């Protein structure tokens, strides 16, 4: 049984999803289908080509939803619509498009095709080499969450993951426990499986933005490292995730 990719397709800029379209033939070689979600701001031409291809199974948000509501509705639809033992890859279109149009293509497929039921839940996390391609402030803020998790749960976990893998029945079981409706819902998914989840570091999660935007990687990296907006953007979800970790630790130790 081939795995299934589960991908939010909200792309108001219209920049990301054309890159995804370019790799659909490659995705079809290793994935059975894509469960996707589209919103009112997803470009109409993207919606049309997805609807025309039975490889895509879409849900539509007619009214505005938060990013967490988008993710969780999509994940619930994928889990409920799949065989209980179906392997589901929760991932993002820009990361996939980069991995499949870069030198990491072979490694990506090797990792995807190697996953068996006894390997999941599994987080593919950024290796030191992959992190080195990202702006330093990205790494520093997300490491605050990771290091806090180490202190509280004695395990190194990627709470702001880019790619996580479940069997459908596992995802169905934990989704009702997720209460956040912002990006911190990603951390809640990890918290729910923190005792059994495994981690695999991969280079194919190197920074995708320069490829997607078609700009010089070093210039963009320096720009993002000097951006107060980028700091605020990361603080928004890092602070929320830290509170979730604290609450989970308090519940475990003092309930």
Image (cartoon, grey):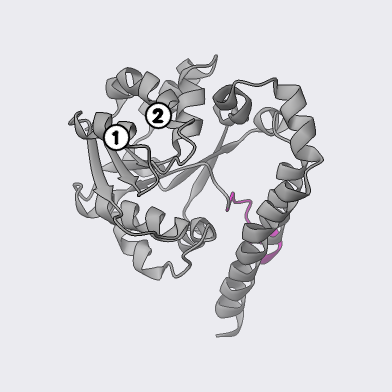
Q: Is residue 33 shown to the viewer in this render?
A: no
Residue 4 image position (x, y, % from top left): 29, 37
Q: Nearer the viewer, residue 246 or 228?
A: 228
25 on left or right of 53: right
136 on left or right of 171: right
Number of the label disc, if any, that sits on residue 3: 1
Kindly identify the residue that appears in the image at 51 percent across and 61 percent down: 182
Number of the label disc, if any, that sits on residue 12: none
Q: Nearer the viewer, residue 245 or 225?
A: 225
153 is within the stretch colored magenta: yes
Figure quadrant of residue 202: top right
Quadrant (top left/top right/bottom left/bottom right) for the C terminus: bottom right
Quadrant (top left/top right/bottom left/bottom right) for the N terminus: top left
Alpha carbon of mark 2 to alpha carbon of mark 1: how far? 8 Å
Q: Helix, strand, or loop for circle 2?
A: helix
Kindly identify the residue that appears in the image at 35 percent across and 49 percent down: 40
Q: Which residue is farthest right?
A: 226
Q: Is residue 200 shown to the viewer in this render?
A: yes
Q: Residues within 10 Å of mark 1 (few under 14, many from 20)?
A: many
Q: Nearer the viewer, residue 244 or 200?
A: 244
Number of the label disc, if any, that sits on residue 112: 2
Q: Which residue is farthest bottom?
A: 255
Contact, mark 2 vs mark 1 (Cβ under 8 Å): yes
N-term mark: 2 or 1: 1
Residue 30 image position (x, y, % from top left): 31, 24
191 is within the stretch colored magenta: no
Q: Nearer the viewer, residue 100 or 18?
A: 18
Above or below, 5 against 187 in this view is above
The span shown in magenta is: 149-159
Q: Helix, strand, or loop for circle 1?
A: loop
Kindly identify the residue that appears in the image at 33 percent across and 52 percent down: 75
Above or below, 150 against 11 in this view is below
């Amino acid at each position: 049984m081939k795995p299934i990719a589960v991908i939010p397709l909200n792309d108001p800029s219209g920049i990301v999803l054309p890159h995804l379209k370019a790799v659909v033939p490659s995705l079809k070689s290793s994935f059975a289908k894509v469960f996707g979600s589209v919103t009112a701001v997803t470009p109409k031409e993207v919606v049309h080509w997805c609807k025309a291809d039975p490889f895509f199974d879409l849900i539509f948000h007619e009214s505005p939803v938060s990013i967490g509501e988008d993710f969780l509705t999509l994940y619930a639809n994928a889990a409920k619509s799949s065989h209980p033992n179906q392997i589901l890859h929760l991932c993002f279109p820009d990361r996939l498009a980069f991995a499949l149009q870069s030198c990491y293509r072979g490694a990506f497929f090797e990792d995807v095709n190697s996953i068996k039921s006894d390997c999941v839940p599994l987080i593919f996390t950024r290796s030191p080499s992959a992190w080195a391609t990202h702006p330093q402030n990205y790494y520093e803020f997300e490491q605050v969450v990771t290091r806090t998790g180490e202190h509280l749960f004695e395990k190194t976990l990627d709470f702001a993951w880019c790619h996580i893998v479940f069997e459908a029945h596992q995802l169905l079981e934990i989704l009702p426990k997720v209460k956040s409706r912002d990006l911190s819902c990603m951390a809640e998914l990890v918290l729910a499986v923190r005792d059994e989840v495994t981690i695999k570091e991969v280079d194919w999660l190197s920074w995708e933005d320069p490829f997607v935007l078609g700009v010089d990687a070093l210039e963009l990296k320096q720009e993002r490292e000097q951006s107060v907006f980028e700091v605020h953007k990361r603080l928004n979800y890092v602070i929320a995730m830290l509170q979730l970790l604290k609450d989970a630790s308090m519940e475990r130790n003092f309930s």
